[in-house]
Image (spheres, grey):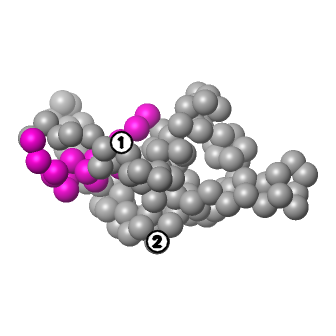
Amino acid sequence: MMLTALNTQTRHGEVCPLDTTLKVITGKWKSIILCRLMKQELRYSELLRTLPGCTRRMLSLQLSQLEADHIIQKEVDPTYTPIKTSYHLTELGQSLVPIIQAMDQWGAQYIKTLERTTD
């Protein structure tokens, strides 16, 4: 499977590691999907239920992109009726956890700073 994050030409004319990282985690629902999967493995229906406003098509697309980039892994258990499909972070996906947490902390501080300057 081809990595989606490496398929895009960068605007700089070179492969930029920061742009690659942003491409992997940028998407309308990717950040929240990753946050959900940082806590536990979830079935498709569980993920969908925790994402109000996300359509089945959009969730499938975002999951497919994360899977193509080797950030999550899809597990299919045909012994269940209906078939149980669940998702979890791969080892590579787990390596993103501290980065996502640091970005979250930075964002919280940024919001506080802006709120203080606009008061």
| Amino acid at the residue labelled 2 | Glu
Q: Is residue 106 magenta?
A: no
For label 2, the crowd category at 10 Å Cα-Cα, with few meaning under 14, some 14 to 19 and many 20 or more, is: few
Quadrant in which residue 118 is drawn = top left
Residue farthest along the right direction in this orientation:
81
Q: Nearer the viewer, residue 58 or 116?
A: 58
CB atoms at circles 1 and 2 under 8 Å apart?
no
Could you tell me which residue is drawn at 31 percent across and 44 percent down? 7
State which region is magenta. Answer: 13-28
Could you tell me which residue is drawn at 55 percent across and 32 percent down? 58
Residue 88 is situated, as x and y percent measured from the top left of the image, at 58, 62
| Amino acid at the residue labelled 1 | Thr
Whole-angstrom CA distance, mark 1 to mark 2, is: 19 Å
Could you tell me which residue is drawn at 44 percent across and 63 percent down? 93
Residue 78: mark: none
Q: Nearer the viewer, residue 84 or 29?
A: 84
Quadrant in which residue 23 is drawn = top left
Which residue is identified by label 2?
91
Residue 34 visible in the displayed image? no
Quadrant in which residue 87 is drawn = bottom right
Residue 66 is situated, as x and y percent measured from the top left of the image, at 47, 50
Q: Is residue 27 magenta?
A: yes
Dividing the image into 4 quarters, which one contains the C terminus? Answer: top left
Vertical placement of residue 36 versus 90, above or below? above
Which element is circle 2 on?
A: helix
Residue 43 is situated, as x and y percent measured from the top left of the image, at 70, 53
Could you tell me which residue is drawn at 52 percent across and 63 percent down? 89
Which residue is identified by label 1?
26
First-in-chain label (1 vs 2): 1
Q: Nearer the viewer, residue 110 or 87?
A: 87
Which element is circle 1 on?
A: loop
